[in-house]
Image: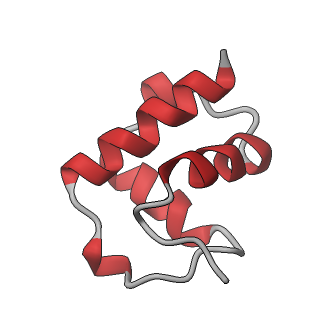
Amino acid sequence: MGLKWTDSLDIAIELYEKFPEQDPTRINFMDLRSKVIELDEFDDDPNRSGERILEAIQAAWIEEAE
């Protein structure tokens, strides 16, 4: 079973592992959306993301990076 937009913590962990050089506090939502879609495990409609979902993913990624 792949990752869905609502799996913010799991997505954040995958982002942290795949993009260790990326500072999650300095990413805009367009780039964040692109990186999520690039994940091998991502299996959801790319057009279903919204600002609230991206904020949740970014916050979880920041938490993971600390």
Q: Position of residue 63 (x, y in %)?
A: 57, 23
Residue, far top? 66
Q: Is 52 left or right of 62, judged from the image as shown?
A: left
Q: Position of residue 20 (x, y in %)?
A: 76, 35
Q: Is 57 left or right of 18, judged from the image as shown?
A: left
Identity of the residue drawn at 67% across and 23% down = 65
Number of numbered labels in the structure image: 0
Q: Is 19 left or right of 59, judged from the image as shown?
A: right
Q: Is 25 left or right of 56, judged from the image as shown?
A: right
Q: Position of residue 13 (x, y in %)?
A: 69, 45
Q: Is residue 66 above or below residue 29?
A: above
- For the C terminus, the image quarter is top right
Q: Is residue 22 above or below residue 53?
A: above
Identity of the residue drawn at 20% across and 50% down = 51
* Colouring chosen for the image of the structure: secondary structure
- For the N terminus, the image quarter is bottom right
Q: Is residue 1 above or below residue 62?
A: below
Identity of the residue drawn at 65% across and 48% down = 15
Identity of the residue drawn at 54% across and 58% down = 35
